[in-house]
Amino acid sequence: MRTFFCVVDLHAITIPHDPANLAYHTRNTAALYLACGIDPQRSTVFVQSHVSAHSELAWLLNCITPLNWLERMIQFKEKAIKQGEQVSAGLLDYPVLMAADILLYQADLVPVGEDQKQHLELTRDIAIRVNDQFGSPEQPVFRMPEPLIRTQGARVMSLADGSKKMSKSDPSELSRIELLDSPEEIQKKIKRCKTDAGRELVFDDPDRPECHNLMTLYQLFSGQSKEAVQKECANLRGWGDFKNLLTEAAIAHLAPIQARYREVTAEPRYLEEQLHSGRERATVIAENTLKHCQHALGFLGR
């Protein structure tokens, strides 16, 4: 099985950004991919903007995608309200670029959170439209991708509000745990996270989103089953004991990732070599798909 991991720096500029930090955050994300266990010898890790076929295919798909398909995207509506007059055409067009990211590599499975499922459905709609208009049942232009959604942790919620998704764009750093947070930062964030008045710790109570979210986080950090977590937490004496348990599990889970991250970033040349190699491998496949799509649409070959 071939796997592709793309650092989506083109997507990053769909909201206001600081150009002085873009390259740093791009390298940082790539280093975290490797630190989390992605093996560059078995997987292709690359930077989105380094493979120009992403932008080129996005334009072709733009000219085929109806505007009303994009206007109904929930994430665009939510972010457009927050950004007001600063909202860009790029934010509206984000899902088309995402479709290009996926379709370029003729992906079978796409790991996504529940909040991105609508975008993947749009990708499938675009693929169907292109295949119907420019391909044939025997020779489709694009393969149909399927979503790969985890049973647990498909949608991790904010530490400050259990009804909202945990997000890096949230202005409050207390709303999220970041992979490189120190033990002290993790402890502070969990200590201050929002809870409720209930004493019993349970999953799946729709009236207690914070409780469900924190229990799910503990399940993910500890690597236990839902049943094991429920049993372990049954005898705790309220939120204070649970927060200590969650803090210890979070620190222990992130420690090896942080150690590997320090190793990766200690040798910048190593990271650059992996991204260069990933770009070359990704470009071969992406260019192949792009040429196939251009030919199907009737463009004059180069």
Image: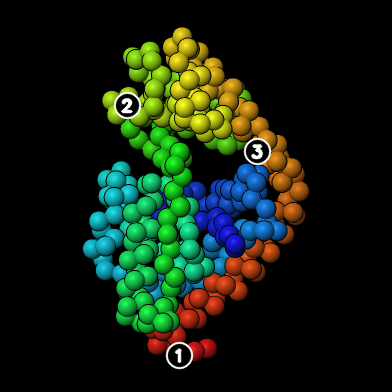
Q: What whole-number distance in Å separates the C-alpha atoms at marks 1 and 2? A: 59 Å
Task: Tell me if I can see residue 66 in this picture.
Answer: yes
Q: Is residue 118 above or below residue 130?
A: above
In this orientation, does residue 54 appear? no
Q: Nearer the viewer, residue 123 or 79?
A: 123
- Disc 2 target residue: 205
Circle 3 or circle 2, nearest the eye? 2
Q: Nearer the viewer, mark 1 or mark 2?
A: 2
At 60% across and 63% down in the image, what residue appears?
2
Residue 217 falls left or right of residue 263: left
Residue displayed at 58% across by 52% down: 26
Q: Which residue is mark 3?
A: 257
Task: Give the class, few, some or many, for how many residues have Cα within 10 Å of label 3's Cα (few <14, many ≥20).
Answer: some
Q: Which residue is identified by label 1? A: 300
Q: Residue 245: image x %, image y %? A: 54, 19
**First in sequence: mark 3 or mark 1?**
3
Disc with the residue nearer the chain's start (3 vs 2): 2
Residue type at mark 1: give it.
Leu
Q: Are marks 3 and 1 in contact (CB under 8 Å)?
A: no
Q: Amino acid at mark 3?
A: Ile
* Secondary structure of residue under mark 1: loop
For the point 55% across and 22% down, the residue is 247
Residue 190 at what x, y percent from top left?
49, 22
Please give the label number shown on residue 117. Answer: none
Asked if 284 appears above or below 34 in the picture, the reply is below
Relative to 295, is 204 on the left or the right?
left
